[in-house]
Amino acid sequence: MQVAATLGDTQIWTDDDTRHCEAVVRAAAQTPLAPEMVGANSAVTDSNFAALASMVACKTTTKIARLCNPDAKAALVADVKDYVGRLDVALLGLKAQTGLMDMMVGVTSGMEGGDEVKGGNAVYHMEQDATMLYIKSYHDKVAAGLKALVRANLVSPGDFGAFMSMGVPETIDNMLKGAVPDHTVCV
């Protein structure tokens, strides 16, 4: 409590901020899929991906001065790492499915039923494209929020490393690519 007494209103995360982010999450969950995303994999669209990404994006853009506090920064870094871990698992699953579908086309090529497998693979690739558009629509918001935090000198890629800023996940590197500090929020 002593820390909170020394911080200004823009540096303290409040219940109102939590309610604001929860409203953002509800809005994301209620947003119908764009036409180009309608065929997306329901394992992704029916999961909590939109909610997770929307909450992280909201936390990266709401009261950013709170991140001057090391505990608040550590909490955000943990949220981002959790998001990236879940994203990477989803992408790995999609990649594995694609590999299996492509392998089945190769195995059945020239065999009876091979054309059906090839047709199914084409449908699967359309589903995968729609799924990737869906993921990207939310992921881009998380990446934009994180880049803004880098520009504000509030986070750096090293914050997401496993040990002494080493082992920064590739997904984090890709999200922060090109972002460099250009101003400072903390004094």
Image (cartoon, grey):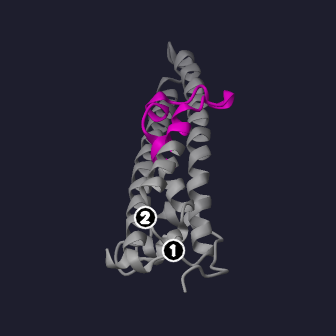
Q: Is the magenta region chiefly helix, strand or loop?
A: helix
Looking at this view, is 24 or 161 the one in front? 24
Q: What stretch is highlighted in magenta?
A: 25-53
- State which quarter of the image contains the N terminus: bottom left
The residue labelled by disc 1 is 155
Asked if the residue under mark 2 is in contact with the one under mark 1, i.e. CB atoms within 8 Å, the reply is yes
Looking at this view, is 76 or 86 the one in front? 76
User: Which amino acid, by three-letter code, is at mark 1?
Assistant: Val
Q: Splitting the image into 4 quarters, where does residue 48 fall?
A: top left
User: Which amino acid, by three-letter code, is at mark 2?
Assistant: Leu
Which residue appears at 43% of the width and 31% of the height?
43
- Crowd class of label 1 (few under 14; some 14 to 19; many from 20; radius 10 Å): many
Position of residue 142 measured from the top left corner of the image (x, y, whole percent): 56, 55
Q: Considering only vertical position in the picture, is 118 above or below 5?
A: above
Q: Considering only vertical position in the picture, is 23 above or below 38?
A: below
The image's mark for residue 76 is: 2
Does the segment drawn in magenta span residue 130?
no
Q: Splitting the image into 4 quarters, where does residue 137 fall?
A: top right
- Crowd class of label 2 (few under 14; some 14 to 19; many from 20; radius 10 Å): some
Pick out the residue farthest to the top.
Answer: 112
Position of residue 10 measured from the top left corner of the image (x, y, whole percent): 53, 69
Which residue appears at 40% of the width and 49% of the height?
86
Pick out the residue farthest to the front.
Answer: 5
